Amino acid sequence: MKVLVTGGAGFIGSHIVDELLLDNFDVIVLDNLSTGKVENMSDRVDHYNVDLKDNLDLVFAKERPDIVIHQAAQVSVSYSMKNPGFDAEENIKVTVNLLEACVKYGVKKFIFASSAAVYGAPEYLPIGEDHPVNPLSFYGLSKRNAETYIQMFSNIFGLNYTILRYSNVYGMRQNTKGEAGVVALFIDQALRGEALSVFGDGLQTRDFIFVKDVAKANVAACHYGDRKTFNISQGTKTSILDLIEELYFNLSEPMMPSFQDERQGDIRHSLLSNQEAKRCLHWEPFYTLSDGIQLTVKYCERHQVH
Ligand code: NAD
């Protein structure tokens, strides 16, 4: 079975590639390296340095993938607020371009990286997949639009799919530039001897999921979960202050939080139910926050750049 992973040189995509290889899939990567890195990728995969906005016929005609796992995207919420056109181009137009190629070349299944951002402000917790979708950012809106296109392609052309809405993903190879995840940012700040930027009182909570568990959910979706949408989350609330405590146990550097004004639009609490994914994908998160932080810190210490 051949799987094409878009964004396979990026943070989450590269871990998906690793898990697919462990599961004996043939894997090819399509990535324009805009934020991804060649060194993230196993040398057991063929990489096409192609932009998804371009014509995809050459790659699809040559490789004829059975499954496409679409991770490539414009991933920054704040960038989307300043550049909604670019965000729409990268997250909607590109997805439609890819869906067209999938239909044309007979791809059997399309697996899509969506986000908790589609829900917007929670009306209740935990958020199940049937929670109203009301995105607050252009990024959330573009992810939601891409989901709807995928469902239309399924209805009209019969393309099979699974949509995975990730909560806050953290782990090895996460970018610390641009809009980094808070775990990557804190570890980077601590290793540089800088104070950790905490917005608000630090009691806001997030649902952190380790990247290897997200990768395993994508591999599970190659086998199960046809034509369904799932939250991929730990299903646990962790406050920013609890996260700092966990980092404190694992980092040899001293750490000081620096409290700053709450950011406008920040959601106070976020928690996604993962019950449906557990039931239908035969998947569950394996790594506790403690395990994941330990592995991430070790990786960052080994790859520290000053
Ligand atoms: P990332 O930036 O590390 O990976 C994105 C990859 O896509 C990069 O390798 C980049 O070079 C490539 N890419 C971007 N635009 C491209 C294009 N036009 N053509 C070809 N390649 C292109 O980001 P990530 O954190 O690994 O995110 C992966 C996916 O997961 C994204 O779709 C993102 O929206 C989604 N997601 C991430 C999180 C998170 O916490 N990181 C949470 C929810 C959803």
Image: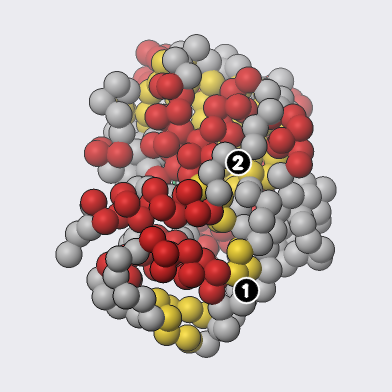
Question: Would residue 189 appear left or right of 279 to someone viewing this image?
Answer: left
For the residue marked with disc 1, what is the amino acid? Answer: Gln
Near mark 2 (Cα within 10 A), the count class, few <14, some 14-19 or many ≥20, is: many
Where does the image place residue 227, in percent across and percent down from the top left? 73, 28
Where does the image place residue 169, in percent across and percent down from the top left? 52, 51
Count of numbered labels shown in the rendering: 2
Snapshot quadrant of residue 152: top right
Q: Residue at (26%, 25%) from the top-left corner? A: 43
Residue pointed to by mark 1: 204
Q: Residue at (51%, 36%) from the top-left corner? A: 215
Compared to residue 63, the image places residue 192 above or below, namely below
Where does the image place residue 75, in percent across and percent down from the top left? 47, 54
Upstream in the sequence, badge 1 or badge 2?
1
Residue pointed to by mark 2: 285
The verdict on label 2 being within 8 Å of ligand 1 is: no
Snapshot quadrant of residue 102: top right
Q: Nearer the viewer, residue 294 or 192?
A: 294
For the residue marked with disc 2, what is the amino acid? Answer: Pro
Where does the image place residue 53, in percent across and percent down from the top left? 43, 39
